[in-house]
Amino acid sequence: MNLFFKPRPAIPDVTHIDIDGARVAITVKVSARARSYRLSLPPGRPPLLTLPAHGRWREAEAFLERQRHWLAARIKRTPQAAPFADGGTVPLRGVPHRIVATGQVRGRVQVGEADDATILVPGAPEHQARRLTDWLREQALHDLQRRTAFHAARLGVSVKVVRLRDQRSRWGSCSSTGTITYNWRLILAPPFVLDYVAAHEVAHMVEMNHSPAFWATVKRTLPEYEKGRAWLKAHGATLMAAGGGS
């Protein structure tokens, strides 16, 4: 038996670091594709520390400590998750609406009067966030199916299925089989933003890449696509944080 042998420290799933007096949880992941240690801040999720397959936990801890100031600065600039709760605000098609709990056990979520930018949410308090999210998903699917069909007709392609997902880093994806998946939070953005993402994904049915030919295809069906693209670059992180805790 080698008394001098010390096993490598196990790599945990979660570690913690103190940032300005607050204990911050860091998700830990080992990736076969990673070539070095990497720290990232995914939208709406805890910080992520990625280790290469050959990584050592002591080296990872030292790397994390060196990144402390970078992480502190990024956390301060990152939009905080905004839960859907009574009295809070949620954008609907780009227009801020106040969330109002109706106090009724039954009923459907609905928009208030035309001159009153509110969304009325029934149900018990513990279920209101889920009910509002489900309703927003319904609205998103309706709008995205309509705009997807519009751009598919313009480009002469056939989309088989339109689906929604609760993604935290992507706005949409298109498979070679004709399935397009969207992030339901697009219903929170102005309509021209949702329209841009729909045009973008449908264009992938023609060009499965981001070549000049692809962008020419997007422009063919949506000449002013740059407006939606620029909006997402400027406000996408804030939009991704919406509905946190719901």
Image (spheres, grey):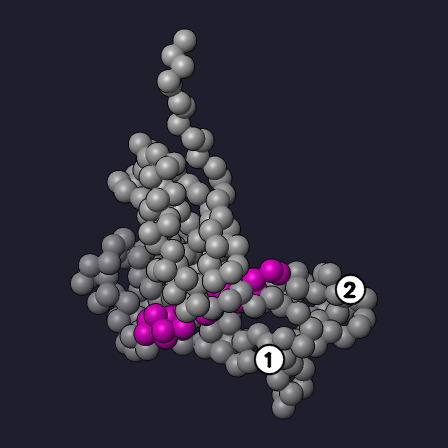
Going 76% across and 75% down the picture, which residue do you hit? 102
Dot 1 amino acid type: His
Residue 37 in sight here: yes
**Residue 16, magenta (yes or no):** no
Q: Residue 118: x, y in percent?
A: 65, 81
Q: Residue 244: x, y in percent?
A: 56, 62
Going 73% across and 61% down the picture, which residue do you hit? 126
Secondary structure found at label 2: loop
Q: Residue furthest front?
A: 3
> Any mark on residue 121, and which?
none
Going 63% across and 75% down the picture, which residue do you hit? 88
Q: Can you say which quadrant of the picture contains the N terminus?
A: top left
Q: Can you say which quadrant of the picture contains the C terminus?
A: bottom right
Which quadrant would residue 70 be assigned to in this image? bottom left
Going 81% across and 66% down the picture, which residue do you hit? 105
**In the image shown, does 193 or 127 lie closer to the viewer?**
127
Residue 138 in sight here: no
The span picked out in magenta is 228-246
Q: Residue 219: x, y in percent?
A: 26, 71
Dot 2 amino acid type: Ala
Q: Is residue 225 left or right of residue 160?
A: left
The residue carrying mark 2 is 124
> Any mark on residue 97, and which?
1
Q: Residue 184: x, y in percent?
A: 51, 62
